Amino acid sequence: MDEFLIDDYDEDHSDCEDRIKVIGMVEKVLVVIYTERGEKYRLISARLANKREEDEYYGQYPNL
């Protein structure tokens, strides 16, 4: 697990359900969007981070 990951509530896309946006690294910087349904997790999206998201990730820890 990436100890530097960013885990935020996704206000822009949480109209019908609470969505969580995670930015973290698994060889490359990835973005995962998921929601919790009871005791289960529903994966909504997983993709490579765009430039803005990479900058957000690396900006927290300039020594990475």
Image (spheres, rainbow, N blue to C red):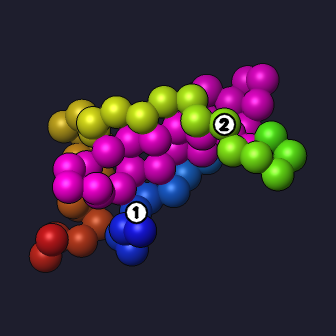
Residue 9 as seen in the image, left or right of residue 29: right
Residue 49 shown in magenta: no
Secondary structure, mark 2, is strand
Above or below, comparing residue 55 to residue 48 in the picture: below
Look at the image and say whether residue 24 sits in the magenta stretch.
yes
Q: Give the image location of residue 45, x and y in percent.
A: 48, 30
What residue type is disc 2 on?
Answer: Arg
- Mark 1 = which residue? 5
Residue 42: give its label: 2
Ranked by sequence position, the earlier of labels 1 and 2 is 1
Q: Residues under labels 1 and 2: Cα distance?
A: 19 Å
Q: Which residues are magenta?
A: 10-36
Which amino acid type is marked by label 1? Leu
| Residue 61, image x, y percentages | 24, 71
Taking the spot 78% from the left edge, 23% from the top edge, the residue there is: 16
Examine the rendering and report whether any part of residue 24 can be seen. Answer: yes
For this orientation, the residue located farthest to the right is: 38
Quadrant the C terminus occupies: bottom left
Of badges 1 and 2, the one in the foreground is: 2
- Local packing at callout 2 (Cα closer than 10 Å; few below 14, some 14-19, many 20+) is few
